[in-house]
Image: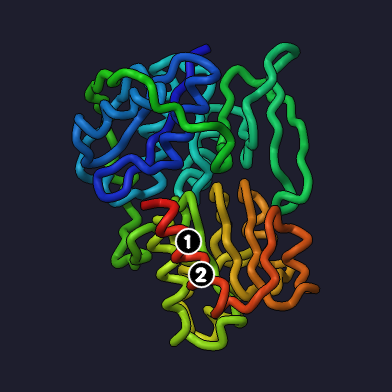
Amino acid sequence: MSVLVFIETEDGKIKKSSREAISFGAAIGEVTAIALGSVSNEELASAGVNGATKVLHAADEKLNAGLIQPYTEVIAKAFESTGAEVLVTAKSSLADAVVGRVSVKLGAALASNVSELPKTDSGFVVKQSIYTGKAFVNTTLTTDKKILAIKKNAIELKTDGAAASVEAFDVALDDALFGAKITSSEKAEGDVLLPEADIVVSGGRGLKGPENWGIIEDLAKTLGAATGCSKPVSDMDWRPHHEHVGQTGVKVSPSLYIAVGISGAIQHLAGVNSSKYIVVINKDEEAPFFKAADYGIVGDAFEVLPKLNEALKKALA
């Protein structure tokens, strides 16, 4: 089966979620990837490690802006010209906007929040996460072309492939496609960004104030993790809003989510219940979050976190 994978990049590097999408595609068939904008051939060739055999590169600098309409045009052209049967992408705000338009443009079935490899022994059936991860649905896709937007951690990352070949992919783009203009943007800051993080350490009101966030940041630094917070914390301006994890904030799917001093309101759980493992640290043994946790520690965060951090430093040294 021929598979096309849409690669997203950030600061000239392939996003980890896109590398997972490449690995997912490689488990289905032979992968050709498509990347847009300015990124080095060396970086694109590294997509082969994750399973791509070839990377098409639409290097027009006008594509650096990440506008939806020209992205739709380029990816639709690549989908047609390669003869791919399946387009795979990591689920993201950009990909959601683009592949929905590609779906309409090419009459391709679209399944989002795909959580595991499709079953092809009797048709083409995908498992999708619905209701913020509380349920799953099996969906049969019947069109010739299919689009899958996959959840993070839908598959183990492949890392044993050879370098991919990189080819220029030139598409004539009408100026009308660039009618929209991004006048300014604000990017989240931090050593590890929340949407791409494999480990997240989040704090809640149990930390009592922004001046106490050092113990969260210390643990995150030890683990190479991103920091997050509950909605009340961001609402009180203890932490920036881009760290708000939950139904109305950032939805995360890390391998490990550590919740410190967070009660576990349903809105917060909706943003983290796709995590592979959840560790809850709370002095209230009746906190609802413990019901969703794989591991729980009942104790005062101000006593537990420093000890946990020191133990981890020794273990990871």
Q: Position of residue 95 (x, y in %)?
A: 47, 43
Q: Amino acid at mark 1?
A: Ala
Q: Position of residue 97 (x, y in %)?
A: 50, 47
Q: Position of residue 109 (x, y in %)?
A: 63, 29
On screen, residue 203 versus residue 184, left or right, reads right
Q: Which residue is mark 1?
A: 311
Q: Which residue is mark 2?
A: 307
Callout 1: helix, strand or loop? helix
Q: Residues within 10 Å of mark 2 (few under 14, many from 20)?
A: few
What residue appears at the point 64 percent right and 55 percent down from the top-left corner? 278
On screen, residue 68 versus residue 152, left or right, reads left
Tell me if residue 274 comes above or below residue 193 in the rendering.
Answer: above
Q: Amino acid at mark 2?
A: Lys
Q: Quadrant of residue 100?
A: top right
What residue appears at the point 57 percent right and 61 percent down from the top-left corner? 258
Say which of 156 and 154 sits in front: 156
Q: Is residue 217 visible?
A: yes
Say which of 133 and 83 sits in front: 133
Q: Quadrant of residue 42?
A: top left
Callout 2: helix, strand or loop? helix
Q: Are marks 2 and 1 in contact (CB under 8 Å)?
A: yes
